[in-house]
Image: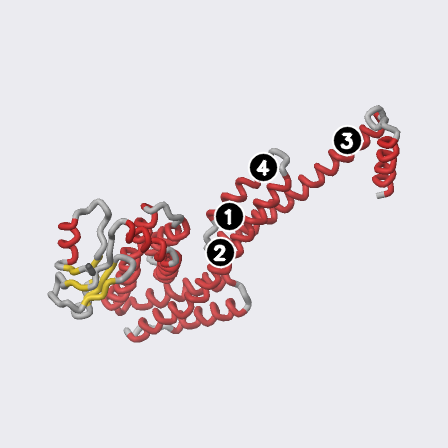
Amino acid sequence: MDKAVRMLLSAKDSYKKDDIVDNKDLMEDLQKVSKKLLQDDIRKAKKNLLAKEKYVNEVKNMGGEVVTSEELLKRAIEVLGRDDHLQSTKYANKAAEMAEASREKRIDNIEDAIPITRKIIDQSKQLGSDVDEAEKLLKQAEVALDKNDFMLCSELTKKAENVAIETQSTQTQKAMDLRQRLIGDISQSISQVEPLIMEAERYGMDVRESREMLQRAKLALESHDYVNGTLYVKSAEETINKLEPEIEKFRTGKGVLKPTAGICSKCKSTNLKFFDNGWGKCFECGHIFKWMSKPDQNEKEKKGLLGRMFKKK
């Protein structure tokens, strides 16, 4: 510190004498100090970047969505390669900030998985299966949650789910029925939310998070991970539903109006409900249908899907 003060005083004195440029020793010292300060800042930026990369990876290992955070980290690395330590730190900090939000959302999903798994265990129990091991694992998961050990909680909850289903070996057909119901619920949700995501994409909206959650739901369904499949498709629905007001504006602008009445193509009932996400349901027979077709489909194709419909004039 004393050396730096002396150097500054010397520079100030040389400036007053108008010979700062000619003072080679002083200029060399100033150059060395400036170079050292830059190196120190770059070193701090690298340390910060490594810490933020580690945190983002931890969130990713938890199952959190970190696509945007990873993109920001790539930018941080690129600008740091050009010695822009300030911009690098800014990108790295923003990446960690977004990862933190994703972490909180993932924690919510992990917490929500416990009652969903409890429901699966209860269904298995009703089928006459031995669910003692599954209940024991779920209790351990709840203890892990109380200790904020979210990764362990997620693992134990998943094991509890698997055990609850696997112990139905003596109830094979009933177990298959249970799986089919779970698959059906997730598949139905996927089939309802995907068209809405595709529609928003056509309007140029940012649906990366919804698309990512939908893809995870599909992968979970393929691997028979019904709990996470339910959670991921629920997340996809929540994120895309936030865009529904904007989607509705685009629909209005394109002349796409939600029907107010119609006739079920299955049972001919008029007791129908039309939802904003482009789907509808018959309350008489439970038939679920899609009332909104793609923009390039003609009116005849739309009517073929719904049966006869009547819109507001």
Residue type highlighted by circle 1: Ser
Residue 161 quadrant: bottom left
If you read the primary sequence from the N terminus, does the residue marked by circle 4 or circle 2 appear first?
Answer: 4
In whole angstroms, how far apart are the C-alphas of marks 3 and 1? 36 Å
Crowd class of label 1 (few under 14; some 14 to 19; many from 20; radius 10 Å) = many
Q: Position of residue 135 (x, y in %)?
A: 41, 72
Q: Nearer the viewer, mark 3 or mark 1?
A: 3
Front in this rendered view, residue 38 or 130: 38
Residue denoted by label 2: 102
**Which residue type does callout 2 highlight?**
Ser
Residue at the extreme front: 313
Secondary structure beneath dot 4 equals: helix
- Residue of label 1: 69
Q: Residue at x 36, y 51 (%)?
A: 215
Q: Mark 4 Cα within 10 Å, few/some/many (few <14, many 20+)?
A: some
The amino acid pointed to by label 3 is Gln
Disc 3 to disc 2, C-alpha distance: 44 Å
Q: Residues within 10 Å of mark 2 (few under 14, many from 20)?
A: many
Q: Quadrant of residue 281?
A: bottom left
Residue 31: which numbered mark, if any?
3
x, y percent for residue 81: 60, 34
Tell me which residue sits at (31%, 71%) in the image.
Answer: 124
Q: Are marks 2 and 1 in contact (CB under 8 Å)?
A: yes
Q: Is residue 91 above or below residue 235?
A: above
Residue 79, which numbered label?
A: 4
Q: Is residue 228 visible?
A: no
For the N terminus, the quadrant is top right
Q: SS for tag 1?
A: helix
Q: Earlier in the sequence, mark 3 or mark 1?
A: 3
Query: What SS does tag 2 mark?
Result: helix
Here the colouring is secondary structure
Q: Are marks 3 and 2 in contact (CB under 8 Å)?
A: no
